[in-house]
Image (cartoon, helix red, strand yellow):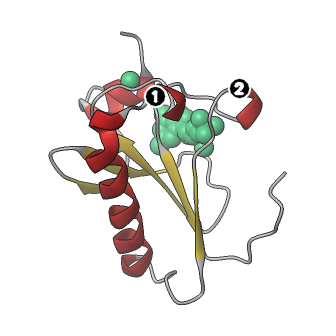
Amino acid sequence: MDCIFCKIAGGQIPSSIVYEDAELIAIKDINPAAPVHILIIPKAHIDSLDQASEKDIQLLGHIQLVAAQLAREHKTAESGYRIVNNCGEGGGQSVFHVHYHLLGGREMQWPPG
Ligand code: 5GP
Ligand code: ZN
């Protein structure tokens, strides 16, 4: 499949990796929207959160705990941070391999645009 995040997870496209385990990879976003902007990407391809199912419950929970760990490591846990999943074109998704954004290091606005 011609998927940029599959290629990044498979090491075919270089990226700035900040965390990796058997299930997922975390990389710095190429076009950061905040001082801390990390993408948490499952190694297995799922198009979007809308395509996730019961079998992904452990993975989805694992992503949140890794995000919290990365927030601590990147010194943004105390000041606060945001975890975002953009789902579908109307939700702002541009890469159709499910991933979560960890954003921190600045004041977050609410509601998001
Ligand atoms: P989405 O818009 O799908 O929620 O998020 C996709 C994110 O992937 C964007 O923030 C974009 O900057 C990032 N991105 C797209 N291509 C690459 C790439 O080749 N390398 C990295 N590190 N990030 C990428
Ligand atoms: Zn993929």
Instruction: Judge whether 34 appears above or below 81 on screen.
Output: above
Mark 2 and mark 1 in contact? Answer it, CB < 8 Å.
Answer: no
Q: Amino acid at mark 1?
A: His
| Residue pictured at 82% horizontal, 67% vertical | 110
Instruction: Judge whether 35 appears above or below 12 on screen.
Output: below
Tally of numbered discs: 2
From the image, tell me which residue sits under label 2. 89
| Residue pictured at 61% horizontal, 76% vertical | 105
Residue 57 in sight from this viewpoint: yes
Image location of residue 48, percent across then percent down: 51, 29
Q: Secondary structure at mark 2?
A: helix
23 horizontally vs 35: left or right? left
The image quarter in which residue 89 lies = top right
Ligand 2 has an atom within 8 Å of the beta carbon of the residue at disc 1: yes
Number of other residues with Cα within 10 Å of mark 2, as a class: few under 14, some 14 to 19, many 20 or more: few
Q: Amino acid at mark 2?
A: Glu
From the image, tell me which residue sits under label 1. 97
Q: Secondary structure at mark 1?
A: loop
Image location of residue 55, percent across then percent down: 27, 35
Image location of residue 88, percent across then percent down: 65, 28
Q: Earlier in the sequence, mark 2 or mark 1?
A: 2
| Residue pictured at 81% horizontal, 69% vertical | 109
Ligand 1 resides in the quarter of the picture at top right
